[in-house]
Image (cartoon, helix red, strand yellow):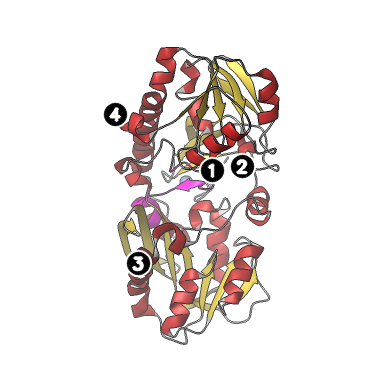
Amino acid sequence: MACLLCKSNNVKRIDKLCDNMKILGDTFPDTPSYINVCNCCGLVYIDMDISQKDILHYYTSGNCVPICYENLFGAEHTKKYFEHIYHTIEPYIDFDSKILDVGGGLGEFASFLKNLGYHNITIMDPAQISIESAAKKGIDTVKADSTQLIEAWTGKFDLILLIHVFEHIYAQNETLNNLKKMLKTDGMMYLEVPDASKYCNDENVPFYYYTYEHIAHMNQFDIRNISCLTGMELLDTQEYLKCEQYPSVYGLYKNGDKIKQAVYHDLGEDCAQAYLELCKTRSRKMTQKYCEKNESLVLWGIGASTAQLLSSGFDRCNVCELVDSNPRRQGMEYQVGTKKMKIISPSELQARIKKDDVIVVMSIMYKNSIIKQIKEMGFSNKIEALSKEDMLA
Ligand SMILES: [Zn+2]
């Protein structure tokens, strides 16, 4: 798979991320995904056997729920975060500016701008749920994907926003070309993504930042390369913590035509290698006690965020079954150590489980509700759960 950003085919694989991409949804293939680095521009991205159409289907099929900042980070952090973005763009816009929020989700930021007096904002998003939510907030909406050039649109934009959207886009190069055509001659683009050079700094569960929704893992140098590849002038860039906890980096660009060759950097690869090493170390620590006891384990909850633990941590343990209550995931195959194993349903497990098998709950976030469910189903086996404390011990 060629580099998402500069389209070079001169790329290399640095690691395997997951055995089976079907974890994301029905339309994905049951093939592995890899972490690639571009030898031309240095971008780190996930190599999967998919197309932009598959990605689009994922976001429009209801498999994915757009995030609500207020619920996730709280009203105060959200307000501060939106003010931070606003202060960056404010010198370049006025109340009549025509603003496009690409992948604007539930319309929270658009609504924030509208309340300040900006009345000419449009949200472009492929998901019906986002369009409906934004429309309820009185925001103009267009249901479309960023790779579809909207030729029918009249008038170009003064400002295009891509706030934690670009890392989800497979066709990055095409998207930038399309958006440039939708910008006024002196129009601006604000693009903010997770800062992959800071993934190692926090104490989240292993592979937290390698969520399958994020295809590109960018840093300040990739932000600069967007300027080179599009010809847009980079006026401002900064690394900071979104909502005071999520490492982010942004670029504010002014439309222009000074197209240059992308400049290679090795920060992406260095940080990806360091993060992978850290994730694997933490996975091993998290699973250490299970390996030592050599008990026969039933792993319950093979979700997108836990599937990686099967090949880094549980591969050394005595795993006898993989279970998930989501019917979409049942039947999927994973390599666990030397065994190829299929995910089964809880009712299939009831017929197969042995008295001494230990059930390990894989999700840290939903641990309590899963344990409740397991008990209600009548399993009398010993139940344990993965813990972050083990990981940091
Ligand atoms: Zn590249």
Disc 3 to disc 1, how far (Cα)?
A: 29 Å
Disc 2 to disc 3, how far (Cα)?
A: 32 Å
Q: Are marks 3 and 4 in contact (CB under 8 Å)?
A: no
Magenta segment range?
Answer: 209-223
N-terminal of the pair, mark 2 or mark 1, is 2
Residue displayed at 61% across by 36% down: 21
- Amino acid carrying label 3: it is Glu
Q: Let me know if residue 262 is in the magenta part.
A: no
How many residues crowd mark 4 within 10 Å: few (<14), some (14–19), many (20+)? Answer: few
N-terminal of the pair, mark 3 or mark 4, is 3
How many residues crowd mark 3 within 10 Å: few (<14), some (14–19), many (20+)? Answer: few
**Does the beta carbon at disc 1 come under 8 Å from ligand 1?**
no
Q: Quick one: 368 or 268, which is closer to the camera?
A: 368
For disc 1, the marked residue is 212
Mark number for residue 393? 4
N-terminal of the pair, mark 3 or mark 1, is 3
- Amino acid carrying label 4: it is Ala
Mark number for residue 24? 2
Q: Nearer the viewer, mark 3 or mark 1?
A: 3
N-terminal of the pair, mark 2 or mark 4, is 2
Q: Quick one: 389 or 49, which is closer to the camera?
A: 389
Secondary structure mainly formed by the magenta segment: loop
Q: Is residue 247 above or below residue 322?
A: below
Q: Quadrant of residue 37?
A: top left
For disc 3, the marked residue is 76
